[in-house]
Amino acid sequence: MKLYFAPLEGITGYIYRNAYHDLFDCGIDQYFTPFIAVSQNGLTKTRELEDLSAEHNKGMKTIPQLLGNSGAEVNHYLHRLSEMGYEEVNLNIGCPYPTVVTKKKGAGLLADTSVLKEFLDGAFENPPVKVSVKTRIGMERAEEFEEILDVYNQYPLSELIVHPRVREDFYRNHPYLDAFAYALKKSRAPVCYNGDIFTIQDYQMITERFPRLNRIMLGRGLLANPGLLLQIRTGKTIKKEEWKTFHDRLYHDYSKIMSGDKNTLFKMKELWNYFQFLFGERDRYIKKIRKAKNFAEYEAAVNALFAQCPFIPNGGFRAD
């Protein structure tokens, strides 16, 4: 089974990827960058170039992900990324957030298949790299996916990563597994599953339901339980001290590249939206972490939680 680490905007940048790769990676086949918003200016932003640099992606296969609504602009980025040494790029046609969808980007491209086709025509104009797509199955109804997949099948996708929810679901409700079964049966490109794998039981349910499936993308479940990959690959669980080492590595590395306590703590508090589920009886300690205004307060709150709260290596994170 090929296992991929999903991109999460603002979280899975190179600092996170390198810490995870060094401390927990026992078999991630591909990491995907948080989406790069395509623009007429081209690939010029320092933050994006830092995330893509070869120095920050040593020893791992990293796939850049692009978000845009102009196939011609995407195609320009494909050439630039090829010059940087990348051999494959992923297109985000699934992001459900209003600021993206209203611009006919991400899942917004799924509202009109003629618009989707125009976008892909431009992107696939003699691309210098392999191009994969990460998609949802429609805007409002799962039945939309049949027509959407007909469009995808007209292009030489290297892979189709399917999150079987519609845009209106955001991350609520359950994935439409019948729609994913349709993708496995009808897609001309290899199909990867993505969505709601938070525990080893979730993983087993998907692999038993789809015995032909040979690739899965892990996202929020892997953030909430960094040891999920270890469980899948070996049946073992991470130890409390191993997770603490991971936390401290992230904290140290973010503090080196960010200016001041405030920015570093904002990043760490964002991660605690997921990390908290590794601990029982956590509520009052999590409140102290979220209220921390400087490094000293933050470190004291984290150390108190680590010392007082039971560690739950399987995590307790579920979709809302």
Image (cartoon, rainbow, N blue to C red):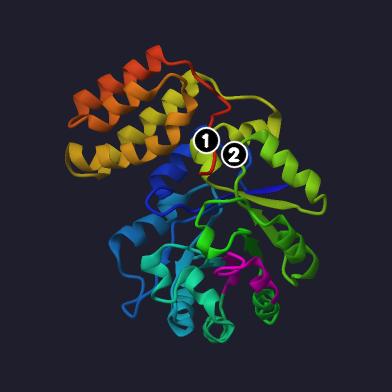
- What residue occupies the far top of the structure in this picture? 308
Q: Could you tell me which secondary element the residue under label 2 belongs to?
A: loop
**Residue 46 or residue 305, whichever sits in front:** 305
The residue carrying pointer 1 sits among few (fewer than 14), some (14 to 19) or many (20 or more) residues within 10 Å by Cα, namely many
Q: Work out how far the residue at label 1 is from the one at label 2, CA to CA, in angstroms.
A: 7 Å
Res. 153 visible in picture: yes
Residue where numbered disc 2 is placed: 198
- Residue 40 position, x and y percent, is 34, 80
Residue 136 colored in magenta in the image:
yes
The residue carrying pointer 2 sits among few (fewer than 14), some (14 to 19) or many (20 or more) residues within 10 Å by Cα, namely many
In this rendering, position of residue 278 left or right of residue 290: right
In this rendering, position of residue 287 left or right of residue 131: left
- Residue 67 position, x and y percent, is 45, 69
- Residue 177 position, x and y percent, is 71, 55
Picture quadrant where residue 293 is located = top left
Q: Amino acid at mark 2?
A: Phe
Tell me what residue is drawn at x 40 percent, y 47 percent: 11
Name the mark on residue 317: 1
User: Which of the marked residues, 1 or 2, is nearer the chain's N terminus?
Assistant: 2
The magenta stretch is 129-146
In this rendering, position of residue 259 left or right of residue 108: left
Tell me what residue is drawn at x 70 percent, y 79 percent: 150
Picture quadrant where residue 183 is located = bottom right
Image vertical order of residue 288 relative to residue 124, above or below: above
Q: Could you tell me which secondary element the residue under label 1 belongs to?
A: loop
